[in-house]
């Protein structure tokens, strides 16, 4: 019986990475997960706990060395590992550059020395900043905060390794990913985690502004299928958007979740709309999202107990948590000291 192809998933115990791992196992791959479990959960790999096709290495990606034996024989690398969130990136920019840029370089070097067939980088649509919509891949790059900058510089490193070292690489700029297994701890951040914990507690949803702002929510399994297509294609040196292409308002999300709401101030540096133009990935890879917003929200709500240990945010604690955000990104703001 021929050996299974080997894929490496950095951040594979995390939110999207664990869905990527699931898909790869389903498609017949042996998966090597690298995750330091700071943001990921070993429980996210529970479906494979007794499966020899999935192994977990708990190192930080920055500890990888160019001739790392973990990469030996691997054909595909999917690089999700890194750190997110806006406010911590404003407060700790050096750590974000280290993890998201230098960490990416460490992965690139290990992949290059192992001679992998393709590396696919998890980029962020935040690189576009306050973008025109729908947003194409050739939109000007305008990062608004260090997290966005660090993810874009990681992407630049990826394409530089493709250019200089002939490492086959592609990059996917993820829009507003949501779904089961998203992170439940840490800084104030993604709307789903905030709202789900508030729903569990019977508290009102904290709506930024008037709730008419729209986000291009894309379900995690659809993100994973886009990455697999980007890994298995013969194309390289490409960047693609992954989004649903159907922006949904925050008010619509609240309708689906059900509950009262309270309004908090609109924040600087946040777009009114995120809207992925996915024409290119549809044309090049035949990819299209399969999970509707209504179905995706239903899946998340069905597993709402997952978020029971998440922080419960209130207007007061959000105001405190985002003070640095307002100071740094408001017009005329002096920024953090």
Image (tube, helix red, strand yellow):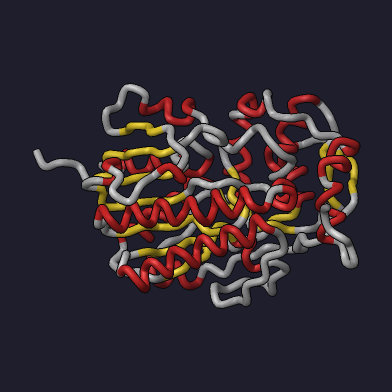
Rendered location of residue 24, percent (x, y): 34, 43
For the question of whether residue 315 can be seen, the reply is: yes
**Residue displayed at 26% across by 48% down:** 74
Give residue 330's quadrant in the image.
bottom right
Vertical order, 134 against 45 (above or below): below
**Residue displayed at 40% across by 51% down:** 107
Vertical order, 109 against 314 (above or below): below
Give residue 302's quadrant in the image.
top right
Rendered location of residue 79, percent (x, y): 43, 51
Horizontal side of 83 relative to 225 (left or right) equals: right
Horizontal side of 199 relative to 94 (left or right) equals: right
Relative to the observer, which residue lies in front, 165 or 232? 165
Relative to the observer, which residue lies in front, 82 or 18? 82
For the question of whether residue 226 can be seen, the reply is: no
Relative to the observer, which residue lies in front, 121 or 226? 121
Rendered location of residue 25, percent (x, y): 32, 39
């Amino acid at each position: 019986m021929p050996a299974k192809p080997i894929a490496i998933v950095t951040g594979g115990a995390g939110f999207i990475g664990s869905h990527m791992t699931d898909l790869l196992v389903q498609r017949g791959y042996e998966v090597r997960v690298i995750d330091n479990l700071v943001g990921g959960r070993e429980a996210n790999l529970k479906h494979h706990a007794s499966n020899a096709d999935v192994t977990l290495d708990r190192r930080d990606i920055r500890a990888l060395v160019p001739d790392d034996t973990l990469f030996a024989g691997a054909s595909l690398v999917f690089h999700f590992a890194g750190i997110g969130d806006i406010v911590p990136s404003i407060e700790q920019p050096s750590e974000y550059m280290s993890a998201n840029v230098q960490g990416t370089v460490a992965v690139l070097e290990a992949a290059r020395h192992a001679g992998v067939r393709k590396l696919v980088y998890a980029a962020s649509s935040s690189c576009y900043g306050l973008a025109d919509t729908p947003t194409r891949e050739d939109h000007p790059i305008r990062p608004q905060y260090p997290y966005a900058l660090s993810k874009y510089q990681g992407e630049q490193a990826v394409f530089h390794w493709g250019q200089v070292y002939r490492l086959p690489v592609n990059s996917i700029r993820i829009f507003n990913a949501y779904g089961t297994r998203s992170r439940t701890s840490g800084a104030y951040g993604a709307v789903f985690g905030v709202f789900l914990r508030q729903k569990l507690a019977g508290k009102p949803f904290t709506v930024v502004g008037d709730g008419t702002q729209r986000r291009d929510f894309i379900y995690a399994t659809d993100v994973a299928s886009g990455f697999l297509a980007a890994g298995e294609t013969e194309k390289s040196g490409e960047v693609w958007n992954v989004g649903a292409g159907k922006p949904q308002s925050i008010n619509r999300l609240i309708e689906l979740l059900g509950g009262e709401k309270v309004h908090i101030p609109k924040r600087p540096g946040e777009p009114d709309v995120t809207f992925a133009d996915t024409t290119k990935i549809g044309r090049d890879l035949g990819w299209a999202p399969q999970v509707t917003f209504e179905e995706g929200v239903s899946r998340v709500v069905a597993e709402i107990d997952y978020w029971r240990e998440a922080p419960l945010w209130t207007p007061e604690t959000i105001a405190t948590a985002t003070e640095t955000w307002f100071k740094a990104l408001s017009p005329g703001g002096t920024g953090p000291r």
